[in-house]
C-alpha cells in the first residue's frame, strides 16, 4: 500500500494553520504543524516529511535559517510563504535552497498547484542533461546542444543555451537572479543583473511565440525567473 505524502506546515498564525492543514488533508496528504523555527527543525528531524511549507516570519528565528537547515540535510522540497512586498526575504530564502514561494494572502488552489509542482520535481520528473526533452512546442537535444520549435531549429548562442538548460532543468522552480548569474557567469557577476536581462531578452525573442507575453520564460518580479511547468502551459 502506498504511503501518503507527509507535509510539514510551519506557520505561527493559527488562522493559516486552521485553513491550510484541513485543505491539505482533504487532498490526501498527512500534515504535521509547527509554530516556531525550533519546533519545525525538531519535527523535520523526527518525521523527515516529503515537503515543507515554510512561513518566513517565525517568532523565534528567521525562516531562512530553517530553510538552510533543511537544505543541508537533503533535497526535501520547500515552498515558502511570505508577506506581500517582502521581496528581499523571498530572494534570501530561494538562495538558501527553497524551491518556490507563494505570497500571503493566497488562494487554496494556487497553494495546491505549487505543492503538486514541487512534489513532481522531487519525484524525479525534472529534466536530465542527456538525450532529448520536450516542453510544449520546444525540443531540447542536450547531447547535440540543439533546440527546435516545432520542426524549425533555433540557433542559440552558448550562453543562451546554458540559460535555457538551467531553467528547463528546474522547470516550475523559481531561480533567483543571483543564482542564475552565479551559474552562468560566476560569483563575480552576481551584482550585475543587466547581463541577465539582456540575455533573457535575446532568448525570449528566439523561443517565445510572443516575446512580449512569454509563455515559457516567466518573470518573477524582483526575484528572478522560472520556466513554466506543464500545468501552466496547458
Image (cartoon, grey):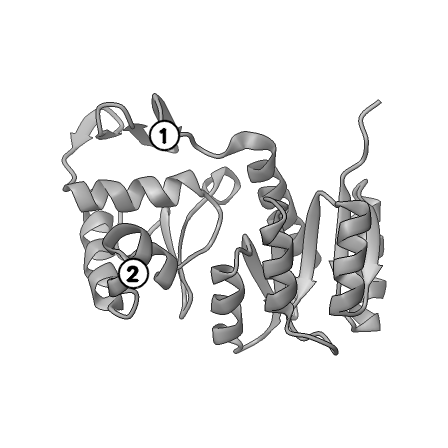
CA neighbours of label 1 inside 10 A, class few (<14), some (14 to 19), many (20+): some
Q: Position of residue 73 (x, y in %)?
A: 63, 48
Q: Position of residue 219 (x, y in %)?
A: 38, 59
Residue drawn at the location 37% of the way across and 45% of the way down: 167
Where, quadrant-wise, is the N terminus in this rendering?
top right
**How many numbered marks does the figure carry?**
2
Q: Position of residue 117 (x, y in %)?
A: 58, 43
Residue 195, picture quadrant: bottom left
Residue drawn at the location 33% of the way across and 32% of the way down: 137
Q: Along the horizontal axis of the image, is 125 left or right of 39?
A: left
Residue 147 vertical position relative to residue 228 in the rendered view, above or below? above
Inspect this view and state whether residue 169 appears: yes
Residue drawn at the location 67% of the way across and 62% of the way down: 54
Inspect this view and state whether residue 207 appears: no
Q: Position of residue 108 (x, y in %)?
A: 70, 57
Of the two numbered discs 1 and 2 on the same chain, state the one appearing first in sequence.
Answer: 1
Residue drawn at the location 47% of the way across and 61% of the way down: 95
Residue linked to disc 1: 129
Numbered disc 1: secondary structure = loop
CA neighbours of label 2 inside 10 A, class few (<14), some (14 to 19), many (20+): few
Pointers 1 and 2 in contact (C-beta within 8 Å): no
User: Which residue is at the front of the view, 212 or 65?
Assistant: 65
Q: Calculate the distance from the C-alpha at mark 1 to the C-alpha at mark 2.
A: 23 Å
Residue 20, picture quadrant: bottom right
Q: Along the horizontal axis of the image, is 49 left or right of 94?
A: right
Numbered disc 2: secondary structure = helix
Residue linked to disc 2: 187
Q: Along the horizontal axis of the image, is 65 left or right of 127?
A: right
Amino acid at each position: 500500500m502506498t504511503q501518503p505524502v507527509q507535509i510539514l506546515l510551519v506557520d505561527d498564525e493559527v488562522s493559516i494553520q486552521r485553513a491550510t492543514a484541513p485543505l491539505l488533508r482533504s487532498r490526501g496528504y498527512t500534515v504535521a504543524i509547527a509554530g516556531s523555527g525550533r519546533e519545525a527543525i525538531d519535527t523535520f528531524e523526527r518525521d523527515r516529511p516529503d515537503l515543507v511549507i515554510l512561513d518566513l516570519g517565525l517568532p523565534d528565528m528567521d525562516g531562512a535559517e530553517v530553510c538552510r537547515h533543511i537544505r543541508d540535510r537533503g533535497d526535501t522540497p520547500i515552498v515558502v510563504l511570505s508577506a506581500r512586498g517582502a521581496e528581499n526575504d523571498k530572494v534570501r530564502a530561494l538562495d538558501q535552497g527553497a524551491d518556490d514561494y507563494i505570497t500571503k494572502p493566497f488562494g487554496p488552489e494556487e497553494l495546491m498547484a505549487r505543492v503538486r509542482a514541487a512534489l513532481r520535481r522531487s519525484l524525479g520528473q525534472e529534466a536530465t542533461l542527456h538525450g532529448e526533452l520536450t516542453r510544449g512546442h520546444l525540443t531540447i537535444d542536450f547531447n547535440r546542444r540543439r533546440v527546435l520549435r516545432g520542426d524549425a531549429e533555433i540557433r542559440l548562442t552558448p550562453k543562451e543555451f546554458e540559460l535555457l538548460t538551467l531553467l528547463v532543468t528546474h522547470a516550475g522552480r523559481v531561480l533567483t537572479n543571483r543564482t542564475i548569474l552565479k551559474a552562468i557567469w560566476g560569483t563575480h557577476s552576481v551584482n550585475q543583473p543587466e547581463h541577465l536581462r539582456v540575455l533573457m531578452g535575446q532568448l525570449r525573442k528566439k523561443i517565445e511565440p510572443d516575446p512580449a507575453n512569454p509563455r515559457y520564460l516567466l518573470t518573477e518580479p524582483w526575484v528572478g525567473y522560472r520556466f513554466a511547468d506543464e500545468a501552466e502551459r496547458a
